[in-house]
Image (spheres, rainbow, N blue to C red):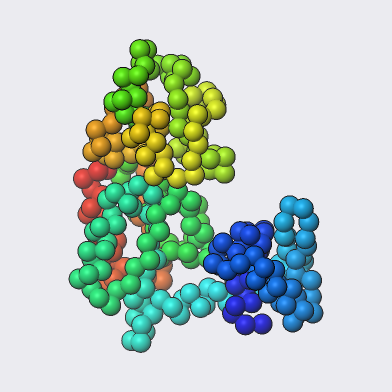
Amino acid sequence: MNWDDTKILLAIGRTGGLSRSAKLLGISVSTVHRRAVELEKSLNAVLFSRDSDGYTLTHVGKHFFALAEKAEEHLIEMERYNDQWQQSLFRIALPELIGQQLLQSKLTALQLKHPDLQLEISTSVVPVDFSRREADIILRLVRPESGRYIIRRLGQLEYGLYCSKDYLASFTKHAETADDLLNHRIIGWDRSLQYTFLAQWMRELTQDAAPALSFDNMHSQLLAVIEGQGITALPCFVAKALGLVPILPMQTLKQDVWLMRHLDTKDSDYSTLISETIEKELQEYLL
């Protein structure tokens, strides 16, 4: 069982399907299927249970999956260090628009000053998996309950409802109360992301009304608002910079911002430098 076999096992175990595994690994569905069959033959074990809903791990498959995850953790750990045994590769996980609009340019500028430093920057609404150490430095809008991280609260970020001037001009009756939102086009979140704090807040404000448009990322929501497609929740600093119009300006959401550093990086000068850069850049925008 080589590392390529391990990737197949991990991908199918995490996605539950061949097509999703193929997309994750950047290979064809037929290749995933062939290698999954070969993996079972090489181990002389049934690892996957196949049904109409996809692939699930058998009891034996779960055992090998756990071993594969441990192997993955060690390999990822090795990749982080240079030939001087100093950590030079850092994975940074940032909330979507905060990362794209505020921090990405500062972090790339930091890397230019330190050529030995390698940064892998993820900007997403989907939280990272702490148990698998998917990131060394994390900026989160919800405090984690567990994980081997040093946690620091930086302040609060304010969110509000916004639309474009063109959208507002197309309505004779403006939204003055939460009930008025029922007469407007709401831009919401994909079903798979209803657990996020913004999706829950929007559902409360709109009384669980079905959104006219749903997306699985905030960048698409922002583009739809700019194009005059409706109303959505956005970080106030982004909306104000783009000249968007606040809706129900007295009803905003303030969310704590948490900066997290993995315990294994606490003595790293690079980790400290990255964390200080993030904190310094955010201070202007936090309450």
- Residue 7 place in picture, x, y as percent: 60, 72
Residue 248 visible in the picture: yes
Q: Nearer the viewer, residue 102 or 146?
A: 102
| Lateral position of residue 216 relative to residue 93, left or right | right
- Residue 219 place in picture, x, y as percent: 39, 44
Image quadrant containing the C terminus: top left
**Picture layout, residue 272 above or below residue 172:** below
| Lateral position of residue 188 relative to residue 104, left or right | right
The residue that appears at 33% across and 35% down in the rendered structure is 226
**Picture layout, residue 258 above or below residue 77:** above
Q: Quadrant of residue 275?
A: bottom left
The residue that appears at 43% across and 16% down in the rendered structure is 180
| Lateral position of residue 60 relative to residue 225, left or right | right
**How many marks do you count on the picture?**
0
- Residue 21 place in picture, x, y as percent: 61, 63
Q: Nearer the viewer, residue 10 or 28?
A: 28
- Residue 35 place in picture, x, y as percent: 68, 74
Residue situated furthest bottom in the rendering? 83
**Picture layout, residue 272 above or below residue 93:** below
The residue that appears at 43% across and 64% down in the rendered structure is 135
Residue 150 visible in the picture: no
The residue that appears at 67% across and 68% down in the rendered structure is 30
Image quadrant containing the N terminus: bottom right
Q: Quadrant of residue 48?
A: bottom right
Q: Quadrant of residue 174?
A: top left
